[in-house]
Amino acid sequence: MQNNIQPNSVSTGELYTLQLPSTYESITLLENLIEDIADKFKISDDTFANMMTCLNEAAINAIVHGNKLDANKKVIVNADVDPKRSIWTITDEGEGFDYNQLPDPTAEENLEKLTGRGVFILKHLADQCIFNTRGNEVELHFKF
């Protein structure tokens, strides 16, 4: 009997993983990874800026709001990158949040507030933004 199973020829790209302690200083490790990937894959300045902004925002939210700046808790960053796109996943160890119940940062009463724009930024700068049901993980897609 012949085995007709063929290996999957679809490339998943290159995989990267960071485990960040929940401190502001750990953001430097993420920024370095973003810069290395942008250089390696020759990502345009606009896409690089969007990635840097979104991933910084998502990681800071995970560190501050998810893990409550508890350095014993980790933020896991995964990236799957190929020459045409990148998919980033940022996961914290927190309880999560209801991303559907956030106040609109463009509403008149919120325009002067200094916080509350993070998810709005992610949804507008990434090509795709997907939260898990619990609200402690976000997946961000960027096309090159």
Image (tube, grey):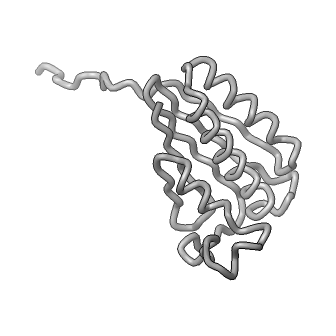
Q: Is residue 75 above or below residue 7?
A: below
The count of marks equals 0
Q: Give percent across and percent down for residue 142.
A: 50, 39
Left or right side of 132 for 117: right
Query: Which of the two residues, 39 or 29, is positioned nearer the viewer here?
Result: 39
In the picture as drawn, the residue positioned furthest to the bottom comes out as 109
Left or right side of 26 for 77: left
In the picture as drawn, the residue positioned furthest to the left comes out as 1
- Tell me the residue at 61%/33% (across/down): 48
Q: Give percent across and percent down for residue 44.
A: 55, 27
Q: What is the quadrant of the N terminus in the image?
A: top left
Q: Give percent across and percent down for residue 104.
A: 60, 74
- Tell me the residue at 85%/52% (across/down): 72
Query: Which of the two residues, 45 or 52, is positioned nearer the viewer here?
Result: 45
- Tell me the residue at 68%/22% (across/down): 36
Q: Give percent across and percent down for residue 101.
A: 57, 78
Left or right side of 32 for 38: left
Q: Is residue 66 above or below residue 16?
A: below
Quadrant in the rendering for residue 138: bottom right
- Tell me the residue at 61%/77% (across/down): 107
Q: Is residue 12 above or below residue 113?
A: above
Query: Which of the two residues, 70 or 114, is positioned nearer the viewer here?
Result: 114
